[in-house]
Each structure stands twice: as structure tokens, then as C-alpha cells.
Image (cartoon, rainbow, N blue to C red):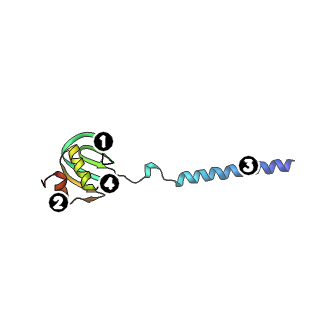
């Protein structure tokens, strides 16, 4: 009887140790939000400063403060997003999409200069 109780106890201890190890490794290996990549997809510079506020534009979330706006990826082309951003916050002097700046013609369209 003693041998059976001892073996059962050892199996339970091993089982708990394996489960604890698996959970610990899983927690360490899984990415956490703190280490997630930045979700800034759009970056705009405004001509005039604005109060800090957050707006949803074409499906992307934009946070603007002073003369800088940053936003997550939207459901429309970048040029359209720029136009909507300009309507909401004012004249845009620079706009980039995933780190690539709009060319002069696209920026002029964003600003409404081609009318």
C-alpha cells in the first residue's frame, strides 16, 4: 500500500510541475501588448495647432494635439484620409502613409489647392 501511495504522490507532483512549467513558458513566449509594434500608420502635420482630441476618420483612429496627428490604418486610400483629416482638423502641411510622404500633387489635392 505504501508503494502505491508514494507512486501516486510522485505522479501528482510531476504532473503539477509539468503543468506549471508549460504555463510559465507559454506566458513568457506569448507577445504582450506592451511589446506590440506601433500601430501608427498615418502621420500629419497641421498648419495651425489644435486641442488634443481623438476622432475616427474613414475607419482609422486619429489622435491630434498641437500641430501633429497620428492615426491607425483606415479603410480608404491615404489621399482620401488626408482630405477628411483636413476637413476635420484644418490645413495639412505634411502627410505620410506608413512612413512614405505624399508627393506635392497629392498633398495639394489633400489641401484642396487644385480647385
The one nearer the camera, 65 or 62, is: 62
Q: Could you say where residue 20 lies in the image, as x and y percent from the top left?
A: 63, 49
Numbered mark located on residue 12 in the image? 3
Distance from the alpha carbon under mark 4 to that under mark 2: 21 Å
State if disc 2 and disc 3 touch (CB < 8 Å).
no
Examine the rendered structure and indicate whether residue 105 appears above or below residue 44: below
**Dot placed on the residue nearer the N-terminal end, 1 or 4:** 4
Q: Could you say where residue 81 lies in the image, as x and y percent from the top left?
A: 26, 51
Q: Is residue 14 left or right of residue 7?
A: left
Q: Residues within 10 Å of mark 1 (few under 14, many from 20)?
A: some
SS under mark 4: loop
Examine the rendered structure and indicate whether residue 97 appears above or below residue 89: below
Mark in the foreground, 1 or 2: 2
Mark in the foreground, 3 or 1: 1
Q: Give the residue at x 47% y 50%.
A: 32
Distance from the alpha carbon under mark 1 to that under mark 4: 15 Å
Q: Residues within 10 Å of mark 4 (few under 14, many from 20)?
A: some
Q: Residues within 10 Å of mark 3 (few under 14, many from 20)?
A: few
**Dot placed on the residue nearer the N-terminal end, 1 or 2:** 1
- The image quarter in which residue 102 lies: bottom left
Q: Residue at label 2?
A: 105
Distance from the alpha carbon under mark 1 to that under mark 2: 28 Å
Q: Could you say where residue 85 lies in the image, as x and y percent from the top left?
A: 24, 47
Q: Residue at label 1?
A: 54
State if disc 3 and disc 4 touch (CB < 8 Å).
no
Amino acid at each position: 500500500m505504501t508503494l502505491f501511495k508514494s507512486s501516486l504522490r510522485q505522479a501528482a507532483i510531476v504532473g503539477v510541475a509539468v503543468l506549471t512549467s508549460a504555463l510559465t513558458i507559454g506566458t513568457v513566449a506569448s507577445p504582450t501588448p506592451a511589446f506590440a509594434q506601433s500601430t501608427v500608420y498615418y502621420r500629419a502635420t497641421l498648419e495651425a495647432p489644435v486641442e488634443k482630441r481623438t476622432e475616427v476618420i474613414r475607419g482609422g483612429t486619429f489622435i491630434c494635439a498641437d500641430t501633429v496627428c497620428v492615426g491607425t490604418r483606415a479603410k480608404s486610400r491615404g489621399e482620401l484620409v488626408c482630405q477628411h483629416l483636413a476637413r476635420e482638423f484644418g490645413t495639412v502641411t505634411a502627410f505620410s502613409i506608413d512612413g512614405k510622404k505624399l508627393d506635392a500633387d497629392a498633398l495639394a489635392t489633400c489641401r484642396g489647392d487644385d480647385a
